Structure formats: C-alpha cells, structure tokens
Amino acid sequence: MDCERWRTALSARLDSESLGVDEALLDAHLATCSACCDHAEALAALHRSLRLRPADDVPDLTSSILAAAAADPRRRRVSPTLLLRWVLVVIAAVEIGLASPDLLGRWHTGSELGTWSIAVGAGFLSVAMKPARAAALVPMLGIAGLLTALVTTRHLLDGVAQLSDEWPHGLVLAGVVVLVAISRLERTADHPGPRSADTVGADGRPARVRRAA
C-alpha cells in the first residue's frame, strides 16, 4: 500500500500547507490504515513538542528595579511647577484675605475692588489646581498687573499714597510672575525636545500633524 503520499499530506496539514490530496480522502485513509494513523499521532506529538516548550528561566529583577528607582535623585527632587503652585496658593490666600473686608463693606468702590481682588485670587487658585490654565490667564492678569504697577508707582511718586498702603498691589504682580513661570514650564513639559524634521513642511514652516481618530 502506497502510504508515502498520505504521510506527506499529514505533514503538510500540520504545517498549514497545501495537502496535495483531497482532505476527505486523507481522513478516509487514516480510518482504514493503522500504520498511517500511528504516524499521524507521532507527527502531532512531535509538532506539539516543538511548538510548546517550557520558557527559559528569567531572573527576577523586581527588587533591583525598585531599588534603582528609589535611589534615583530625580525622584527626590521637588518639581519646580509644584513649588510655584504652592507659592500661588499662598498669594491667592493673602489676596482673598485682604480683599474680603472690602467686599463686605458699605463703600461701593471698595466693594468693587474687593470683588476684583477676590476674582484674581480665585484665578490664581484655579491655576494652582490645574497648571495648564496658566497660559490662558497670563494676558488678562498680566495687563492688570502692569496697569496696577504703573498706577501704584505714580501714586507713590506724587505722594498720594504710602508704600505701606500700596504693598498689597504687589501680590498681583507676584502672582503674574508665577503664572508666567508656570506657563513656560508647562510649555516645556509638552514639548521637551526640538521640533522633529517630519513636522516641518517643505517651505520650512511647521506642518500641521493630524491625529488619527
């Protein structure tokens, strides 16, 4: 009996190749030929042993990785953004605390100034909670701080006010400086490296990269 072609077909079926014969005829032959049936079982066992085998032992590096991470000096370094956020919280708290009496007072202009100061403090607190908002508040509060500095300087030079009366205005300026610093740090964190070549068009201008949906 010519069993060679059937055994070749068995090997091809295990390798997901073309059998060269009708698969139904191959199964019919296996049902009647014990030698080929034994050969099929031996091939299947060999095929399984070659495809499934124990994985090589890999050393457990968990302890060394955790130790290296704990020893990394960057983990012990205080983030500049975090430090500035806490400075902003202190500035906002002082600003709101100083403005609250004016807000509750009967003087109309003082109440309006108190409202503005508390709103500025709330803006500082919002950036302290979410630093990404800093860039959006810099233009408005930056202009407010600049105008406050100009008016305060003029009042001091004209002798209309004393430095002890005008120092709270410096809180707005200090807060704006912190906002600018946080905004720059956030921008650096979003773009830590130089612009890659594939984001620049042929004309040298930045190319717009469309994200995949």
Image (tube, rainbow, N blue to C red):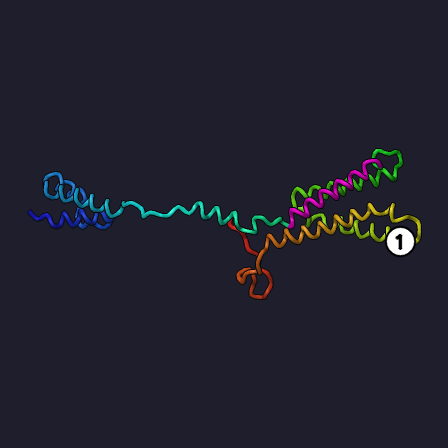
Q: Residue at x 16, y 50 (%)?
A: 8
63 lies above or below 205: above
* Frontmost residue, 14 versus 56: 56
Residue 118, position in %: x, y?
Answer: 78, 39
Q: Residue at x 75, y 44 (%)?
A: 91
Question: Magenta part mainly helix, strand or loop?
Answer: helix
* Frontmost residue, 8 versus 174: 174
| Amino acid identity at mark 1 | Arg
* Frontmost residue, 203 versus 33: 33
Q: Is residue 160 magenta?
A: no
Q: Is residue 188 left or right of residue 138?
A: left
Residue 133, position in %: x, y?
Answer: 67, 46
Q: Residue at x 89, y 52 (%)?
A: 156
Circle 1 residues within 10 Å: few <14, some 14–19, many ≥20: few
In the picture as drawn, the residue positioned furthest to the left comes out as 1
Which region is colored magenta? 80-101
Local secondary structure at mark 1: helix
Residue linked to disc 1: 154
Q: Quadrant of residue 107?
A: top right
Q: Is residue 177 left or right of residue 10?
A: right
* Frontmost residue, 132 versus 153: 153
